[in-house]
Image: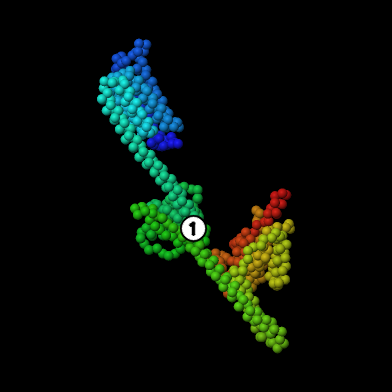
Amino acid sequence: MVSPRQFKTVHDHSLRAEIRLYALYRTLEAVAILAISAPFADTGRHFESMPVYFPMAVNLTYVLIALLFVGLAYTRISATRQIVLGTVLDLVFITLLTWLTPEITEIITPMWMLNVAAAALLVSLPFGLAMALIFSSVLFWLLPSDWVYYLVYGLIYIAIALIASRLGRHISHSDEVTEQQSIEIAELSQMNSLILERLPVGVLVINEKGRIRSSNQVAKRLLRLDPLSTDEEVLDLRSPPLSRKLQQWRNGRPQDQELLSFRHDDAKVEPQFFRLTPKSDDVLIFLNDTSQASRRAETMTLATLGRFSASLAHEVRNPLSAINYAAQLLEESNHLDMMDKKMLAIIQQQVRRTNGVINSVLGLAKREPANPQQFDLCKMLEYFTEEYRSGFPLDNDTLTLNVPEEPISVNADSNHLYQILMVLISNARYYGRLPDQPAHMTLRARVESNTCIIEVIDRGPGISENAARNLFKPFHTTSSHGTGLGLYIARELAQANNGDLKYLRRSNGACFQLSIPVAKDSIANETTH
């Protein structure tokens, strides 16, 4: 079955402007016929019972109906229905007026050409041909004496209908192609926007006045742009160094290779500049965060080191154990003087240090996933403090524990937590002391917003700003005896337990803050109470 849409030359949604013009033409046509037929009102055909003013009344009615269709053209009524109904009424009234006033036939005949064209163009070819043949037949019936004249007009009507229909098909095809291209352009635009937003590289478009026209999420984060703002911000106010590099590029001057940094971000950015189009002054800037590549390289290095250390550990530990065992046997000898005992102590100390280095490096390769279990954090911290005091005599140093009286239930791997605390307390005792002064360390815990906060605080000289930036980077250490892996592994373990480890600056000393989530059961109990 053929759908009605297949008979339509132009799609209905494309006819709103055309139908208004056609309705306006109908009104002008009706007014013109009224003006032309007014002088012939007394000489036209009349029935005996027909009033003299009847032709004028018909003409005025046609004008009013034409005005009505002008109003309908601005409604949501189907455009095709309006055209069909309007053209049929045109045929009825023009036929009636032609019969009542034959003198205006030669003037109405050319006017009907546009009606036929509109019917074929805006509705369908069959409808346009029907209007042409019906009006031609009406002319033959009303004025048979001039049949040759009106036969020519009939052929002209048919030709106009065919041409208009052909033109309509071209318009319809163009509309479909344009609509399809618009859809494809919209899809491409959406896809490009999605790609730009997902890019790990910052993207900026800067106009000739130095204002930011467009940016993706990475660029907004780097420059701290408001993600909801539509105003074009000045690049020089957001990043003067980037603005200077852009100006150097525009002036054709060589650029330095220095990476850009932002105070609120650890990113090291390498900008790249491109002209948006050959004739445009707009500039496309890519902000490549080199720190991501550094982190990937760091991860690959650590993975390689982990695999290497796992195979090397066995070969190193066997002779190391033999050296340690030999030192223990020598220590039992009765023929050792003070110097020999001092040498043995140095050997044992270096054996322990070497073994610690191996354990730290092996931690990168053998770090198992967290095995979280629910336990009371306060009791665990008390046990850790007592064990540390017994295993590592404090002498003049102090370790203070500050935990609330009520239990704190957490869901974490206690072995991981123990290892983190051991790193933090050891660092605080070794680095967190003033010259020739004992170390004073505080271990405290509290709950904030369903998160357990554990802090290790010392009263030492603190950590410089430059050193604080690299605290959690692997192999970074300020000591000749350290490996630079302790804090890195500690933070990795914290994140493996859905927590985090960060450094907080203090006026006197340093503070490392470990945050882990409180157990869900504990949260539910607090909510119930």
| Of residues 439 and 130, the one drawn nearer to the viewer in this rendering | 130
Residue projecting furthest to the front = 1
Q: Quadrant of the N terminus?
A: top left
Residue 503: x %, y % from top left: 60, 62
* Relative to 194, residue 107 above or below: above
Residue 56: x %, y % from top left: 35, 17
Seen at 38% across and 54% down, the residue is 276
* Left or right of residue 171: residue 199: right
Residue 252: x %, y % from top left: 35, 60
Residue projecting furthest to the top = 48
* Left or right of residue 37: residue 472: right
| Of residues 159 and 519, the one drawn nearer to the viewer in this rendering | 159
Q: Which residue is mark 1?
A: 200
| Of residues 24 and 55, the one drawn nearer to the viewer in this rendering | 55
Is residue 315 something one can see in this rendering? yes
Tag 1: Cα neighbours inside 10 Å, few (<14), some, or many (≥20)? Answer: some
Seen at 53% across and 67% down, the residue is 300
Residue projecting furthest to the right = 405
* Relative to 332, residue 161 above or below: above
Residue 176: x %, y % from top left: 40, 42
Number of on-image labels: 1
Residue 42 image-quadrant placement: top left
Residue 509 image-quadrant placement: bottom right
Seen at 65% across and 81% down, the residue is 322
- Hey, what amino acid is under mark 1? Pro
Seen at 43% across and 34% down, the residue is 4
